[in-house]
């Protein structure tokens, strides 16, 4: 079972703000080089986005669809990587004092990943999740440090 957690030193509303930002998807999803397009009001149920993955000279475009949204505590996604298949990704955001505990649970559903799912694949997913959750924490905590007037062009107090 590929379940991993990360403490994010910000309240869960700040974590949700990043999860709800369609353009920030590629900033925290490991292996994704860009996110764009899609349909619907992200991250409402049924909304989608497209993403690009680059592996050396090769590139792959996939899509992500929101299957469940319980703002600000849970986001369930279905990732479609074309020939590689689909996966279920469930992200839970729990309050942890003034911080957040993010729990990521991913399981392949169809295609190569679904057919080849075993302990070795789970080990690879754990490595990917470690990187992905660390990136999510960086993005969330980095946004919190950027207050208006900190050189971002915002007004000064």
Image (tube, grey):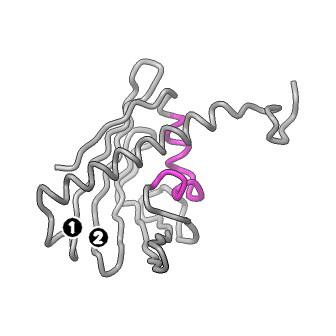
Q: Position of residue 48 (x, y in %)?
A: 47, 67
Q: Is residue 60 left or right of residue 35?
A: left
Residue at left offset 49%, top offset 69%: 51
* Mark linked to residue 156: none
Secondary structure category for the residue under label 1: loop
Q: Are marks 2 and 1 in contact (CB under 8 Å)?
A: yes
- Residue 22 covered by magenta stretch: yes
- Residue 81 covered by magenta stretch: no
* The furthest residue to the left: 118
Tally the numbered discs: 2
Please identify the dominant SS of the magenta region.
Answer: helix
Which residue is tagged 2? 86
* The furthest residue to the right: 156
Q: Is residue 116 left or right of residue 47?
A: left
Q: Position of residue 81 (x, y in %)?
A: 36, 73
Label located before the other in sequence (2 or 1): 2
Q: Is residue 40 above or below residue 2?
A: below
Q: Is residue 39 above or below residue 104?
A: below
Q: Which residues are magenta?
A: 13-29
Which residue is tagged 1? 109
Secondary structure category for the residue under label 2: strand
Nearer the observer, 121 or 9? 121
Q: Residues within 10 Å of mark 1 (few under 14, many from 20)?
A: some
Q: Position of residue 4 (x, y in %)?
A: 28, 41
Residue at left offset 47%, top offset 64%: 47
Residue at left offset 41%, top offset 43%: 133
Q: Residues within 10 Å of mark 2 (few under 14, many from 20)?
A: many
Q: Position of residue 132 (x, y in %)?
A: 41, 49
Rounded to the nearest whole Å, what is the CA distance between mark 2 and mark 1?
A: 5 Å
Residue 74 falls in which quadrant of the image?
top left
Where does the C terminus fall, quadrant-wise? Answer: top right
């Amino acid at each position: 079972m590929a379940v991993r957690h990360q403490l994010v030193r910000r309240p869960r509303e700040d974590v949700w703000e990043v999860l709800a930002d369609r353009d920030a998807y590629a900033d925290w999803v490991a292996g994704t080089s860009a996110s764009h397009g899609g349909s619907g009001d992200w991250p409402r149920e049924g909304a989608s986005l497209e993403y690009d993955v680059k592996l050396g000279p090769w590139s792959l475009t996939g899509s992500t669809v929101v299957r469940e949204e319980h703002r600000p505590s849970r986001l369930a996604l279905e990732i479609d990587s074309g020939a590689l298949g689909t996966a279920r990704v469930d992200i839970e955001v729990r309050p942890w004092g003034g911080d957040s505990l993010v729990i990521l649970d991913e399981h392949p559903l169809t295609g190569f990943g679904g057919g080849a799912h075993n302990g070795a694949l789970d080990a690879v997913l754990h490595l990917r999740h470690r990187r992905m959750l660390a990136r999510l924490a960086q993005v969330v905590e980095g946004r919190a440090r950027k207050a208006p007037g900190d050189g971002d062009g915002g007004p000064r107090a």
